[in-house]
Amino acid sequence: MEKLNYGKSLHRQIKERREDRQIRIRNDIHLYGDAVLDSDEMRAAFEQQHHKWSTVGEHTIRVALTSVLICYVLRKLHIKVSIPAVVIGSLCHDLGIIGRSEKYANNRECLIGHPKDSVEIARELVDELPEKTEAIIERHMWPIGPAKRPNSIEGAVVSVADKYASIKDIIL
């Protein structure tokens, strides 16, 4: 860990570290997720309302940012975690919501159906989508509804980040 420089103000050093971390997170998201970020589906996600004051795209970006940050913390604790799987899983987790009013009769149908639809979209966007990433997307709704619990640390990361971002979307 980098030591603090007592010649600079503590506030300035903390701000610089936060900015550096934000740049690293964004770089990781682009490194592993550009195929998804550059897709027509992601563009449509920014047009689809989600939660109360958000779009699917805005929510998805918040989930990805939070997920990668959690990965950094886990790695500092010497817990192995696949950032590429987390990035793809978080970016694709809600793409199945696009066109919700045409695909689903109600919110319950959307809750149950969009994870599988999101996996199908992810398969189209990502060459050789790993099973682990499919499971991250398919199980991201846990513990809500009939969703299965995550079967990997990466799945737990995305599920937790999704619930955190959803709460922020609803109340902020």
Image (spheres, helix red, strand yellow):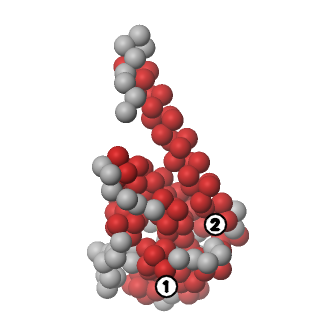
Quadrant where the N terminus sits is top left
State left or right for residue 75 relative to residue 38. Answer: left
Q: Distance between the residues labelled 2 and 1?
A: 17 Å
Above or below: residue 86 compared with residue 144: above
User: Which secondary structure, mark 2?
Assistant: helix
Residue 72: percent from the left, percent from the top? 41, 49
Above or below: residue 125 compared with residue 76: below
User: Which secondary structure, mark 1?
Assistant: helix
Above or below: residue 172 compared with residue 47: above
Q: The disc labelled 2 sits on which kind of residue?
A: Val
Q: The disc labelled 1 sits on which kind of residue?
A: Lys
Residue 30: percent from the left, percent from the top? 62, 54
Which residue is painted at 37% across and 13% down in the image? 6
Query: Residue 116, which numbered label?
Result: 1
Identify the residue position indicated by label 2 in the image.
36
**Quarter of image, res 45:** bottom right
Residue 81: percent from the left, percent from the top? 40, 60
Given residues 40 and 3, the one toward you in this image is: 3
Residue 132: percent from the left, percent from the top? 45, 76
Q: Can residue 130 be seen in this view?
A: yes
Q: Considering only order in the chain, which callout, 1 or 2, is on the residue closer to the N terminus?
A: 2
The crowding category of the residue bearing disc 1, from other C-alpha atoms within 10 Å (few below 14, some 14 to 19, many at least 20), is: some
Which residue is painted at 34% across and 76% down in the image? 151
